[in-house]
Amino acid sequence: MSNKEIRDIKLRVKEIQENPIIKLFFEDDKSTGKGSKEWTNLTKIQLETLIVDLITDEINPKLGYLERGKLRGVTKRSFYRTLEQARLNLIRAIFTIMVASFLNIIDSPRLSDFNELSQNFLDLVTINNLENQTPEEKEKWIKIYTKMIFDNVQNLKKQTALANQDK
């Protein structure tokens, strides 16, 4: 692995970790130094491991887990174990969505708030990717949408969010 490849991989990993969308879900908890796991089933370490693995595959797919682990400062075994856990968590999330879809939960009128939340998130991603705004404008809109999304999530967490509205 060349020094240029190492620099490129580390730079891209840092860019992704610093992305405002990623930071929404993986804010640092100042008291523990760990990221919040409330909004995703991936830990911050699992996310970083996934990112290293994906970017390494793009830059030099021939690099093994030993080199990938070194990029994260861990052993080959630790890197592989964390990657395996991250992949399993992603698979579980996908299967959960599949079960919800099978049960017609996703398209249910009772879940229109979830669909709105999903649309708000897509809008947030679009705003984040816009290149014709100043960083200040982009940051302002990201904060507005972030607040809207997390306010909606707090409402959805209440048990009445899924209650049958006809009762």
Image (cartoon, grey):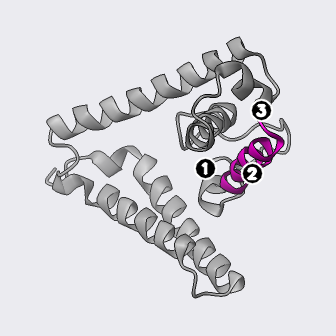
Q: Is residue 156 left or right of residue 25?
A: left
Q: Could you say which quadrant of the image residue 60 lies in?
A: top right
Mark 2 Cα-neighbour bin, 10 Å: few <14, some 14–19, many ≥20 = some
Q: Is residue 7 above or below residue 126?
A: above
In the image, the segment drawn in magenta is 1-17
Residue drawn at x 77%, y 16% is 75
Q: Secondary structure at mark 1?
A: helix
Q: Secondary structure at mark 2?
A: helix
Quadrant position of the N terminus in the picture: top right
- Mark 1 burial class by Cα count in 10 Å: few <14, some 14-19, many 20+: some
* Residue carrying label 1: 25
The span from disc 1 to disc 3 (Cα, nearest Å) is 23 Å
Name the one closer to the observer, 140 or 76: 76
In the image, residue 25 sits, relative to residue 64, either above or below, namely: below
Residue under numbered circle 3 = 71
Measured as percent of width and height from the top left, residue 144 is found at 57, 76
Nearer the camera: disc 1 or disc 3: 3
